C-alpha cells in the first residue's frame, strides 16, 4: 500500500481525542499498620484503588527507578517490608480490566504476607497511609483524527493526561487488554501490527513522555512504511 | 539595617577565621587553601520592599508546562463560561493566601471564569480572637470564652450583612470568615471551605465551636491528607503551589546568581548546602548546623542559612543568636537574616546550592522544599507536615528524622553526584506535575465543574 494512501485512508470512524482531569478526594480510610491496610483495602471505594494504582502511576510517571503504586511504596518506605513491597510493586495495572480484580489481587498479596508474618500486621508504620479517591471529569480536546496523518498530529500534540486516559486508563472502560489507540488502529484503520506494537510499550520503565514519543514513532513508522 | 549589620559581622568573623584555618577547596581535598571570595561592600536596594510584580498572562506558562496543558485549562473552563466565583479571605496583602489569590484570581479570569475577591473587615478584637483561634487550631493551649465566640460571630455577621453572595460558587479561606456560611440559605450557590492550616491536632474546644459551621459547606479543601479532620462533607486535596514565573522561582542569569553569591561571601567553587527558612526552632536551624559540622568531617562544604524573622520577632532574634552560637564563628557557615521581599536573592542562593536542606521538626506544607525541588536541587528534609507529599524517599529527595540522618544524607549526596542529580531531576518533574500554579488552576476548575454538576458525594 502506498504511503499516501495510509496517510489519507478514511477510518471507519474518526478518533476523538479526549482528556481526563482528576480531583483528589480524601476518604475516611487510613492505615497505620499493615493490618489496617488490609481492612482499608477491603472497605475503600473503587475510586481509591484506582487512585493509588492507575492514577498514582501517572502522577509519578517521571520516576524510572521503580515507582509502581502507592501501596508498594508505603510497604517499603514506611513499613520497612521490602519483600511485600516487591510483590505489590509487581502488580501491573495493565493486566487488569476492572478495579475489582485489581483490589482482589492486592488483598490476596497482603493477606498471604500477613498469614506468614502475623506480627508484621501490628507494627506501626513510620507514616500513616491516607486513602484518597479520584473524582474524574472527561473533557473533549480540539483534536479529531479523520486520517492517519491527523492521528499522528493528535498523539504528538495532546497532553500526557490525554495519553494516560487513552493508553492506560482505557482498559477499565474497554474491559479489554488493550487501549483506545490500538483499538482504533486495529478496528478502524486495519493497522494490526501497529496496534500490537503500541500495546507492547512498557509503561513501567519509561516516563509517560517517553511513552508518548514511542507511540508517535510507531504511528509515524506506519505512515512512512505504508502500514500492514 | 539588621541585614547589613549581620553581613558585616559575618565579614568580620570570616576575616578572623581565615587567619585561623585554611579554606577547604573541594570534596576530594577538604583542607587545601583557596582564595577568599569577595564580600559584600555596602547596603543594597533590598532594604526597602520593591513594588509588587503584576502576574504574568496564562500563555507565558506554556513554555514551562507545555501548550497542551494550557489548552486543557481552557477545555476545562469551557463549560464554566458565564459562571461566577467569589473568593473570601481575611487579608488583601501579606501571607500566603493573599499571595496565592493575587495569582489565582487573574488566571481564572483569563479562562473566562469571572472571579471576585473580597476581604472581610473586622476590628482589633476580631483579629485577636482569630489569631488565637489560629494558634489553638495548631494545637496551642487556649481557653475559649463566650466573649471570644461572640466577637467572632458578631464580626462574621456584620460582614454577612455587608457582602452580597450572588455568585455560583463561594470559596471561604481559613477559619476567620467561616461563619459567613450562614448566608448559604439566602441563595443557591455552592459553598467551599479552603483550609490552609494544619488541623491534625486542633484545640478541641475551638474545633468543636467551628466544626458545625464547616459542615454546612458543600465541600472542604485541605493542603495535605494529614491536615484534614473527619467531616460529614467531601474533603478534597489541593496541594499548595508555587508560581514558576515569580521572582522566587523564575530562571535567573548565572551572572546574577554569581553576583548574589559574591555579595554574601558564598564560594561557588565549593559545595554549598543551604537551608532557607525563618529563624524558628521548628525549622531546627541549630540541628542543621550540627548536621553540617558532622558531615564536613568527611566532605568539604559550606552552609548557608538564609531566612528572616529575627528583626520583627523577638523569638526569631533569640533563635538567631542560638544559631550563631552553634556556628561558633565557623567561617564556612554563612548566616543571612533577610527581609521577606528578598525573593530574587533567595532564588539565587537556592540556584547556587549543591544541596538544599529543610530539616523541620514541624512544618506546614513546606513550600521552600517545593522551591528547591523546582530548581532541580537534591533536597534533604524532615519527614513532617506536607514534606512527605513532596519528597518520596530516594526518588525525589531524602527524608530524614535526626541530625545524624541529615548529616549522612549530606555526605552521601555530596559524594554521589549522579544519584543526587537524578533526585533533583525527579524532584523538578514532581513539582511540574503536582505543585505548580497551573495545576492549582486545573484543580479549581475541576472542583467548580464537579460542584456545579452536583456530582459531590
Image (cartoon, rainbow, N blue to C red):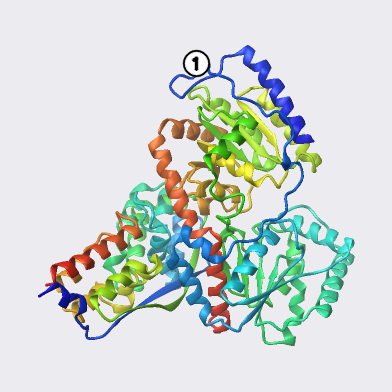
Residue displayed at 63% across by 12% down: B20
Return the residue at label 1: B32
Residue B297 vs residue A113: left or right?
right
- The front one of B439 and A217 is A217
Report the quarter where the N terminus of chain B lies.
top right
Q: Secondary structure at mark 1?
A: loop
Residue A125 vs residue A212: left or right?
right
Tally the numbered discs: 1
Report the quarter where the C terminus of chain B lies.
bottom right
Residue B216 vs residue A185: left or right?
right
Q: Position of residue A99 (x, y in %)?
A: 36, 72
Q: Quadrant of residue A6?
A: bottom left
- The front one of B152 and B356 is B356
- The front one of B139 and A161 is A161
Q: Position of residue B288 (x, y in %)?
A: 60, 34
Whether residue B457 can be seen here: no
Near mark 1 (Cα within 10 A), the count class, few <14, some 14-19 or many ≥20, is few
Q: Position of residue B173 (x, y in %)?
A: 70, 67
Q: B254 above or below B21? A: below
Q: Position of residue A190 (x, y in %)?
A: 16, 78
Q: B57 above or below B344? A: below
> Which residue extends farthest left?
A1
**What is the chain letter for disc 1?**
B
Residue displayed at 50% across by 54% down: B431
- The front one of A168 and B79 is B79
Residue B57 vs residue B150: left or right?
left
Whether residue B90 can be seen here: yes
Amino acid at each position: 500500500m502506498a504511503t499516501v494512501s495510509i496517510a489519507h485512508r478514511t477510518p471507519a470512524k474518526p478518533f476523538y481525542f479526549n482528556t481526563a482531569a482528576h480531583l483528589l478526594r480524601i476518604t475516611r480510610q487510613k492505615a497505620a499498620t499493615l493490618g489496617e491496610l488490609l481492612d482499608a483495602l477491603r472497605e475503600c471505594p473503587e475510586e481509591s484503588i484506582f487512585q493509588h494504582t492507575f492514577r498514582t502511576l501517572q502522577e509519578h510517571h517521571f520516576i524510572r527507578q521503580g515507582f509502581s503504586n502507592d501501596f508498594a511504596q508505603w510497604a517499603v518506605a514506611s513499613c520497612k517490608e521490602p519483600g511485600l513491597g516487591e510483590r505489590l510493586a509487581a502488580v501491573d495495572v495493565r493486566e487488569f480490566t476492572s478495579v475489582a480484580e485489581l483490589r482482589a489481587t492486592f488483598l490476596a498479596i497482603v493477606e498471604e504476607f500477613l498469614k506468614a508474618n502475623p506480627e508484621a500486621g501490628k507494627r506501626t508504620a513510620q507514616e500513616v497511609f491516607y486513602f484518597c479517591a479520584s473524582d474524574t471529569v472527561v473533557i473533549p480536546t480540539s483534536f479529531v483524527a479523520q486520517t492517519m496523518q491527523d492521528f499522528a498530529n493528535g498523539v504528538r500534540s495532546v497532553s500526557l493526561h490525554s495519553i494516560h486516559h487513552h493508553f492506560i486508563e482505557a482498559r477499565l472502560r474497554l474491559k479489554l487488554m488493550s487501549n483506545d489507540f490500538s483499538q482504533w488502529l486495529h478496528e478502524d484503520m486495519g493497522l494490526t501490527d501497529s496496534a500490537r506494537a503500541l500495546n507492547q510499550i512498557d509503561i513501567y520503565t519509561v516516563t509517560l513522555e517517553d511513552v508518548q514519543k514511542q507511540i508517535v514513532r510507531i504511528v509515524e513508522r506506519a505512515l512512512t512504511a505504508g502500514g500492514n | 539595617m539588621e541585614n547589613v549589620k549581620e553581613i558585616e559581622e559575618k565579614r568580620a568573623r570570616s576575616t578572623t577565621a581565615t587567619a585561623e584555618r585554611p579554606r577547604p577547596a573541594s570534596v576530594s581535598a577538604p583542607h587545601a587553601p583557596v582564595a577568599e571570595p569577595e564580600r559584600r561592600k555596602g547596603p543594597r536596594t533590598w532594604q526597602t520592599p520593591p513594588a509588587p510584580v503584576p502576574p504574568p498572562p496564562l500563555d507565558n506558562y506554556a513554555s514551562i508546562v507545555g501548550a497542551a496543558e494550557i489548552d486543557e485549562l481552557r477545555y476545562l473552563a469551557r463549560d464554566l463560561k458565564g459562571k461566577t466565583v467569589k473568593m473570601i479571605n481575611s487579608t488583601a496583602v501579606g501571607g500566603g493566601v493573599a499571595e496565592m489569590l493575587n495569582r489565582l484570581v487573574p488566571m481564572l479570569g483569563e479562562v473566562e471564569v469571572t472571579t471576585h475577591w473580597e476581604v472581610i473587615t473586622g476590628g482589633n478584637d476580631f483579629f485577636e480572637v482569630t489569631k488565637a483561634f489560629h494558634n489553638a487550631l495548631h494545637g496551642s493551649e487556649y481557653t475559649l470564652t463566650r466573649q471570644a465566640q461572640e466577637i467572632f460571630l458578631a464580626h462574621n455577621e456584620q460582614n454577612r450583612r455587608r457582602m452580597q453572595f450572588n455568585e455560583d460558587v463561594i470559596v471561604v479561606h481559613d477559619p476567620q470568615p467561616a461563619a459567613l456560611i450562614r448566608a448559604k440559605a439566602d441563595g443557591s450557590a455552592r459553598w467551599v471551605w479552603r483550609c490552609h492550616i494544619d488541623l491534625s491536632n486542633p484545640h478541641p474546644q475551638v474545633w468543636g465551636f467551628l466544626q458545625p459551621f464547616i459542615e454546612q459547606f458543600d465541600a472542604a479543601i485541605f493542603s495535605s491528607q494529614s491536615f484534614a479532620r473527619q467531616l460529614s462533607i467531601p474533603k478534597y486535596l489541593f496541594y499548595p503551589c508555587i508560581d514558576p514565573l515569580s521572582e522566587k522561582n523564575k530562571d535567573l542569569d548565572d551572572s546574577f546568581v554569581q553576583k548574589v553569591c559574591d555579595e554574601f561571601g558564598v564560594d561557588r567553587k565549593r559545595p554549598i548546602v543551604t537551608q532557607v527558612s525563618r529563624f524558628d526552632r521548628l525549622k531546627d536551624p541549630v540541628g542543621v548546623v550540627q548536621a553540617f559540622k558532622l558531615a564536613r568531617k568527611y566532605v568539604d562544604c559550606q552552609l548557608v542559612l538564609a531566612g528572616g524573622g529575627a528583626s520583627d520577632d523577638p523569638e526569631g532574634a533569640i533563635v538567631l543568636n542560638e544559631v550563631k552560637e552553634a556556628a561558633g564563628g565557623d567561617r564556612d557557615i554563612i548566616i543571612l537574616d533577610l527581609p521577606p521581599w528578598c525573593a530574587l536573592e533567595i532564588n539565587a542562593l537556592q540556584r547556587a546550592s549543591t544541596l538544599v536542606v529543610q530539616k523541620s521538626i514541624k512544618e506546614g506544607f513546606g513550600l521552600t522544599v517545593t522551591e528547591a525541588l523546582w530548581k532541580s536541587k537534591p533536597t534533604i528534609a524532615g519527614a513532617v507536615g506536607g514534606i512527605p507529599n513532596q519528597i518520596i524517599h530516594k526518588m525525589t529527595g531524602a527524608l530524614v528524622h535526626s541530625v545524624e540522618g541529615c548529616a549522612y544524607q549530606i555526605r552521601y549526596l555530596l559524594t554521589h553526584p549522579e544519584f543526587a542529580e537524578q533526585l533533583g531531576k525527579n524532584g523538578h518533574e514532581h513539582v511540574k506535575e503536582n505543585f505548580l500554579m497551573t495545576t492549582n488552576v486545573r484543580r479549581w476548575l475541576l472542583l467548580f465543574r464537579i460542584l456545579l454538576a452536583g456530582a459531590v458525594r
